[in-house]
Image (spheres, rainbow, N blue to C red):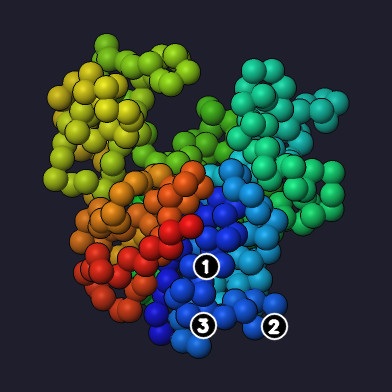
């Protein structure tokens, strides 16, 4: 029995169908299936691409027929928050993900392809209900999957609060949408990556010109230590960061017990392993890149030749 771990699809159903065909999956009854393999989706099914609903339907049918497992990405989290009224708003006009003001414009823009296909239809509610059934991470006997960062601290904080099979409940959605709630930080860490505070007196300007005092880091890169080497940001901004080491307590150390797969990072170029047991399968299918899978056949040390690349 093998697993095919598939990267962020972002509404690119053409690429998904081609990838599944290429890996020997066939459409039978209402789902793609493979005689002896299971697919695993790392999240981010929606936003950006031209076939949002088709992507949702393919992934959901595979999960419901037992041909795939799927976890929650930050784009599904955002989709749920967009569609969930904020219980704190008296008139019920506010949602957990803001729809008004400058932020609302940006949020709608990020979500526009999905909204264009479902807004105002019952399919919208149906898709959101299904996103709420997706676990935040998978810890299978053989391997692990999380959208952005495998972090024991955040996982153990969340575990007692999560619904059955590590799902977000409606109450948790509210807490995960409040910046001052520890649940926000934990859910964001798992689905968007590890963020660490810069040393005292340091800051940088993000792409919108806002001053930031935290940076997202390459949490998997145990061979590097400084903010400058580990930060995930454009080259020029990164080179302006200090060469000071990121404090050890801010960095999760991966226990290496099993391979772990992530998506999320919009990587480019030829797929590489992030570490012996860590692989990212997101190669920007959502913005012109190939859809990539890792075909896992039981190996405990990952092998770069197991990447399967589906050019558009
Ligand atoms: Mn993502």
**Which residue is pictured at 25% across the width and 57% down the height?**
273
- Label 1 beta carbon less than 8 Å to ligand 1: no
The image's mark for residue 29 is 2
Toward the viewer: 134 or 76? 76
Q: Is residue 24 visible?
A: yes
Task: Provide the residue designation for mark 1.
Answer: 18
- Secondary structure state at the residue bearing disc 1: helix
* Classed neighbour count for the residue bearing mark 3: other residues with Cα under 10 Å, few (<14), some (14–19), many (≥20): some
| Of callouts 1 and 3, the N-terminal one | 1
Q: CA distance from mark 2 to mark 3?
A: 13 Å
* Quadrant in the picture for the N terminus: bottom left
Task: Provide the residue designation for mark 3.
Answer: 34
Q: Check contact, mark 1 vs mark 2: CB within 8 A.
A: no
| Percent x, y of residue 309 | 38, 63
Q: CA distance from mark 1 to mark 2?
A: 18 Å
Toward the viewer: 175 or 60? 60
Please tell me whether residue 251 is drawn above or below residue 89 in the rendered image: below
Q: Check contact, mark 2 vs mark 3: CB within 8 A.
A: no
| Percent x, y of residue 222 | 18, 47
| Percent x, y of residue 275 | 22, 56
Please tell me whether residue 160 is drawn above or below residue 83 in the rendered image: below
* Classed neighbour count for the residue bearing mark 1: other residues with Cα under 10 Å, few (<14), some (14–19), many (≥20): some
- Quadrant position of residue 293: bottom left
Please tell me whether residue 226 is drawn above or below residue 257 in the rendered image: above
Disc nearest the viewer among 1 and 2: 1
Left or right: residue 250 versus residue 54 is left
Q: Residue pushed farthest front?
A: 312
**Which residue is pictured at 67% across the width and 24% down the height?**
105
Q: Check contact, mark 1 vs mark 3: CB within 8 A.
A: no
């Amino acid at each position: 029995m093998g697993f095919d771990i598939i990267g962020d699809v972002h509404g690119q159903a053409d690429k998904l169908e081609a990838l599944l065909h290429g890996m020997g999956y066939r459409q039978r009854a209402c789902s793609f299936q493979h005689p002896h393999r299971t697919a695993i989706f790392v999240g981010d099914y929606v936003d950006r691409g031209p076939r949002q609903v088709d992507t949702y339907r393919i992934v959901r049918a595979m999960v419901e027929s037992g041909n795939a497992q799927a976890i929650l990405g930050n784009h599904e989290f955002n989709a749920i928050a967009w569609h969930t009224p904020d219980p704190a708003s008296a008139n019920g006009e506010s949602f957990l993900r803001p729809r008004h003001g400058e932020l609302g414009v940006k949020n709608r823009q990020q979500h526009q392809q999905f909204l264009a296909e479902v807004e105002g239809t019952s399919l919208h509610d149906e898709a959101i209900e299904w996103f709420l059934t997706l676990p935040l991470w998978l810890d299978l006997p053989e391997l692990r999957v999380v959208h952005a960062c495998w972090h024991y601290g955040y996982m153990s904080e969340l575990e007692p609060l999560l619904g059955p099979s590590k799902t977000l409940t409606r109450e948790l959605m509210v807490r995960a949408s409040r910046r001052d709630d520890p649940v926000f930080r934990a859910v964001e860490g798992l689905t968007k990556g590890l963020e660490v505070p810069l040393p005292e007196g340091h800051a940088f300007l993000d792409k919108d010109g806002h001053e930031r005092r935290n940076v997202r880091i390459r949490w998997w890169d145990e061979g590097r230590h400084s903010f400058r080497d580990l930060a995930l940001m454009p080259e020029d901004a990164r080179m302006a960061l200090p060469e000071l080491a990121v404090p050890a307590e801010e960095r999760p150390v991966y226990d290496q017990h099993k391979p772990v797969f992530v998506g999320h990072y919009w990587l480019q170029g030829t797929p590489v392993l992030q570490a012996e047991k860590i692989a990212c399968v997101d190669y920007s299918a959502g913005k012109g890149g190939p859809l990539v899978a890792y075909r896992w056949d039981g190996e405990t040390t990952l092998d770069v030749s197991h990447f399967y690349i589906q050019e558009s």
